[in-house]
């Protein structure tokens, strides 16, 4: 539920903090006092369209903060978790409107995109009015609402999983068929290419290895002579190693006579001998490397030529020839063994489709049954709203040939406003006033399923009065027993039903230089005065105050479920049966129970009561 709404510098609102309670809250006030501004600000916090014109004149930016209390299993909490946002301790939506038209969005003081803010806001609040966008008249949402009414969410989720499995089986079969068709068209070419590449047997990295060996062999031939000369000088017949070794032996024999003079020289000559011997080893290794078989060089060159020719022919790098050979071999295998695989995939698709069709058929049957119950429940709400001649119907059209993730049903809410007229889609047939009452009847029926925890009704009682307004108020109060309800209203019958009454007004500030919207919570006498104003208009009379008292007293009495009321209503129905001249009048008498106060007529309706 919405716990608190804080608005700063939005149009005529400089600073406003409103605490909300559970149940029904009404917002009343003179036309132009700022009720629409308040709703526009609230919609901004829920992710609505921003506008630089919302910023109060003289301010750099405006800000709206909405604080909600929700349970851990609420869909909004799941949305936050999916977005990596913290939802401990409630949900705080905040929107900053800058003077240049840009906006910034926050959830629990974490910056988010407007799309995320809008998704979370839609899960928390629904705003309904005669000229606003309404989910209930959007045909694309009707199937979801019917499923929620019938508690079919698990069945729908199961059907969606089977649909995904069916699509995966279809995709696998289509890919296999496409591969088989492609392979069949290129069968001759594939066989020739596969055989040629199999004979060539290319290996990854082979070209690099052969090219390096070839380069080494060709360069070795050029430097072999120099290597031999160097080897001859270091370790051949003219090598100084033998002479140096003899000199070391002679010096060692004299070492005892003058060790300090001889030992350094002996060590240096030994190091020179070792270095020459190491050089001789390297030269011998280099000569061995340059010593190649010309036939081997020829074989390497032929292999490189064959690999590079194949690379040009198949338009692929030499290192990719091995992978290409494997692909061609797989394509040939697909041709040879594809028929068996095709039958396996066709069987898998058939089984997946059968499971989906069974689930979708079961779901469709449940929807048709739920539609009848929904129609009955909504039509029962219409008579007290003075739509007793209207009929509501849920059209469930099944199209097995055109399935989807949620089955193969199209669901749309239809209405017939008068007998003999053609039924049609809710949005197209109902007028503005009728649409609001149909909407209210639907919300009452759907309140415990498929509804946001906070509902806002913006003047849905426009154009109605008397008993209809009172019936609207009764249903809003009943609806508020399940969800939080806020209603902007001009109907005193609706205002009298509220548990919280907020008065929207304008205050003059700075010696008349500017005005600001204010919201005051009304209690007792002040509330009676406001309802009297709504009844009387500009001049509040004693009769208006007395009528306001009656409305407030009746609002606290009507609709209570006590034994006294049950007994009185029972005898009132019996008296109505005795006096009724037709079953039609009896039905009207029964429907009138919605507004009859404790077995006696509602003020202003005595004539109709006694005529029964």
Image: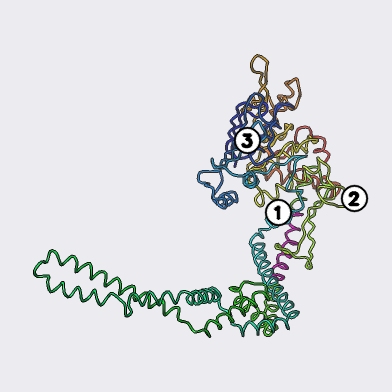
| 186 left or right of 292 in image | right
Report the label total: 3
Mark 2 and mark 3 residues within 8 Å of each other at the beta carbon = no
Dot 2 crowding, Cα within 10 Å, few <14, some 14–19, many 20+: few
Circle 1 residue: 145
Q: Tell me the residue at 33%/79% (across/down).
A: 236
Task: Compare marks 2 and 1 and give the one earlier in the sequence.
Answer: 1
Q: Where does label 3 land, which residue? A: 499
* Comparing labels 2 and 3, the label whose residue is closer to the camera: 2
Residue assigned mark 2: 421
Q: CA distance from mark 2 to mark 3?
A: 40 Å
**Tag 1 secondary structure:** helix
Query: Closer to the N terminus: mark 1 or mark 3?
Result: 1
Q: Locate the N terminus and report the quarter of the image it occupies.
A: top right
Where residue 210 appears, as percent x and y from the top left, is 53, 77
Residue extending furthest right? Answer: 420
Q: Magenta segment range?
A: 355-376
Residue beneath the point at 80% across and 51% down: 392
Q: For the C terminus, give its image quadrant.
A: top right
Q: Closer to the camera, 27 or 248?
A: 248
């Amino acid at each position: 539920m919405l716990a608190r709404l804080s608005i700063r510098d939005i149009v005529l609102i400089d600073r406003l903090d409103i605490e909300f309670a559970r149940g029904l809250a009404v917002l009343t006030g003179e036309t132009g006092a700022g009720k629409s501004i308040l709703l526009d600000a609230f919609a901004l916090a829920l992710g609505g369209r921003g506008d630089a014109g919302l910023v109060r004149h003289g301010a750099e930016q405006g800000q709206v903060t909405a604080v909600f209390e929700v349970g851990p299993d609420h869909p909004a909490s799941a949305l936050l978790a999916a977005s990596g946002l913290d939802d401990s301790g409630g949900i705080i939506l905040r929107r900053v409107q800058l003077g240049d038209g840009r906006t910034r969005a926050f959830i629990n003081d974490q910056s988010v995109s407007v799309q995320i803010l809008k998704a979370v806001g839609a899960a928390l609040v629904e705003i309904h009015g005669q000229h606003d966008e309404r989910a209930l008249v959007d045909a694309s949402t009707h199937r979801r609402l019917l499923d929620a009414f019938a508690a079919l969410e698990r069945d729908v989720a199961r059907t969606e999983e089977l649909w995904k499995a069916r699509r995966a089986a279809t995709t696998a079969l289509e890919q296999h068929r496409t591969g088989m068709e492609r392979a069949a068209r290129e069968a001759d070419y594939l066989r020739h290419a596969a055989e040629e590449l199999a004979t060539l047997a290319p290996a990854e990295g082979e070209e690099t290895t052969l090219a390096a060996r070839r380069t080494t062999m060709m360069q070795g031939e050029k430097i072999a002579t120099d290597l031999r000369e160097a080897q001859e000088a270091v370790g051949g017949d003219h090598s100084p190693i033998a002479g140096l070794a003899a000199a070391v032996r002679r010096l060692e024999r004299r070492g005892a006579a003058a060790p300090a003079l001889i030992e350094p020289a002996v060590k240096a000559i030994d190091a020179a001998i070792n270095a020459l011997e190491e050089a001789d080893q390297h030269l011998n290794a280099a000569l061995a490397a340059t010593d190649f078989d010309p036939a081997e060089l020829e074989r390497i060159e032929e292999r490189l030529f064959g690999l590079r020719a194949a690379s040009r022919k198949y338009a692929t790098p030499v290192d990719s020839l091995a992978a290409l050979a494997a692909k061609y071999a797989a394509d040939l295998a697909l041709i040879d063994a594809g028929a068996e695989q095709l039958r396996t995939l066709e069987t898998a698709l058939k089984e997946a489709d059968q499971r989906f069709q069974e689930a979708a058929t079961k779901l469709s049957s449940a929807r048709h049954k739920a539609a009848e119950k929904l129609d009955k429940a909504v039509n029962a709400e219409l008579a007290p709203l003075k739509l007793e001649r209207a009929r509501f119907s849920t059209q469930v059209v099944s199209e097995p040939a055109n399935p989807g993730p949620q089955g193969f049903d199209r669901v749309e809410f239809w209405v017939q406003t008068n007998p003999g007229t053609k039924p049609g889609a809710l949005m197209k047939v109902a007028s503005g006033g009728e649409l609001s009452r149909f909407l209210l009847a639907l919300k009452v029926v759907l309140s415990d399923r498929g509804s946001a925890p906070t509902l806002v009704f913006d003047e849905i009682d426009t154009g109605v009065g008397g008993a209809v307004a009172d019936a609207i108020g009764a249903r809003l109060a009943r609806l508020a027993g399940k969800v939080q309800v806020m209603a902007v209203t001009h109907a005193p019958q609706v205002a009298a039903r509220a548990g919280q009454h907020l008065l929207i007004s304008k205050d003059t500030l700075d010696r008349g230089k500017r005005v600001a919207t204010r919201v005051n919570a009304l209690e007792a006498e002040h509330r009676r005065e406001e309802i009297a104003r709504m009844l009387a208009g500009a001049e509040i009379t004693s009769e208006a105050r007395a009528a306001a008292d009656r409305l407030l007293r009746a609002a606290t009495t009507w609709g209570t479920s006590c034994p006294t009321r049950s007994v009185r209503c029972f005898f009132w129905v019996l008296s109505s049966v005795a006096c009724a001249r037709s079953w039609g009048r009896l039905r009207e008498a029964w429907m009138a129970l919605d507004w009859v106060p404790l077995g006696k007529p509602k003020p202003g309706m005595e004539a109709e009561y006694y005529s029964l």
